[in-house]
């Protein structure tokens, strides 16, 4: 039996003037985790939030914080985000000189590890680090902004990652992020994804619609 599809709303699309209330509402609406996009204006062309905001938001929900670090160099910030309340930390191979060591450090900090593959990053990167990861995140847009369109050609990469995870025999989440709607969610899940990041599709219509929006993404 296939594992249930989990939904991780991205707070990048939330109302930043009341993030605490937004996160509480997402948990109440049935979100499985909170996806926190951290951007530095260098590794990706946007700037979002840092560890103090994550720490301030942590008390507003009991569900895990899935922290996606789009910063370079990434290693100097791992401990700060771990201490701020991240439950899992996902990093890009391009964000530091030694992805294997970076993942080891995240493990040593007691957090779940994730590796992120951008549209231009080969899936072969997984072959040398799969034993160290709890989550594989396939980006179906180029990182840096919300509201982009789903890149359909990435579905082949999702399938290839799913095959590698199956062969590993380990319980590794396969997450997809970028342009997720009820329609593209079905395609991502069919390709093997079991965790979906969604921003616009979750937040449209305001808090009264969050539960229905999340349910629609589960299919």
Image (cartoon, helix red, strand yellow):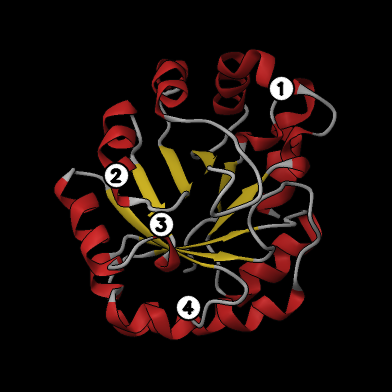
Give the CA distance from mark 3 to mark 2. Answer: 12 Å
Q: Calculate the distance from the C-alpha at mark 4 to the C-alpha at mark 3.
A: 19 Å
Q: Secondary structure at mark 2?
A: helix
Tell me if mark 1 has few (under 14), some (14-19) or many (20+) residues whose alpha carbon lies within 10 angstroms of its own.
some
Which label's residue is closer to the chain start, 2 or 4?
2
- Residue picked out by circle 3: 91
- Work out whether mark 4 precedes mark 3 in sequence or the reverse, and give the earlier one: 3
Q: Is residue 22 left or right of residue 207?
A: left
**Front-most of residues 24 and 115:** 115
State which quadrant residue 199 falls in: top right
Q: Where does residue 14 sit, x and y in percent of width and height?
A: 69, 28
Q: Residue furthest right?
A: 205
Q: Residues within 10 Å of mark 3 (few under 14, many from 20)?
A: many
Q: Sequence-wise, which precedes: disc 1 or disc 3?
A: 1
Above/below status of 214 relative to 105: above
Classify residue 78 as left or right of residue 45.
Answer: left
Q: Residues within 10 Å of mark 2 (few under 14, many from 20)?
A: few
Q: In this figure, which residue is indicated by the disc labeled 2?
A: 76
State the residue position of label 4.
162
| Relative vertical location of residue 194 with respect to residue 206 in this rendering, above or below | below
Alpha carbons under labels 1 and 2: distance apart: 29 Å
Q: Are marks 2 and 4 in contact (CB under 8 Å)?
A: no
Q: Are marks 3 and 2 in contact (CB under 8 Å)?
A: no
């Amino acid at each position: 039996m296939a594992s249930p599809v989990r939904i991780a709303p991205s707070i990048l699309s939330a109302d930043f003037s009341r993030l605490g209330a937004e996160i509480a509402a997402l948990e109440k609406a049935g979100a499985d985790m909170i996806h926190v996009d951290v951007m530095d204006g260098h590794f990706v062309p946007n700037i979002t939030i840092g560890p103090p905001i994550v720490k301030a938001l942590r008390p507003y929900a009991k569900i895990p914080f899935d922290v996606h670090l789009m910063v370079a160099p990434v290693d100097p910030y791992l401990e700060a985000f771990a201490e701020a309340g991240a439950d899992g930390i996902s990093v890009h191979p391009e964000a530091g000189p030694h992805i294997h060591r970076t993942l080891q450090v995240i493990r040593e900090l007691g957090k779940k590890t994730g590796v992120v593959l951008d549209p231009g990053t080969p899936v072969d990167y997984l072959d040398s680090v799969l034993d160290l990861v709890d989550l594989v995140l396939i980006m179906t847009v180029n990182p840096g902004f919300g509201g982009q369109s789903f890149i359909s050609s990435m579905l082949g990469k999702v399938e290839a990652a799913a095959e590698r995870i199956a062969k590993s025999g380990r319980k590794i989440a396969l997450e997809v992020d970028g342009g997720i709607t009820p329609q593209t969610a079905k395609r991502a899940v069919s390709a093997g994804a079991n965790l979906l990041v969604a921003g616009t599709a979750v937040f449209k219509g305001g808090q009264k619609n969050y539960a229905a929006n999340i349910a629609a993404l589960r299919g």
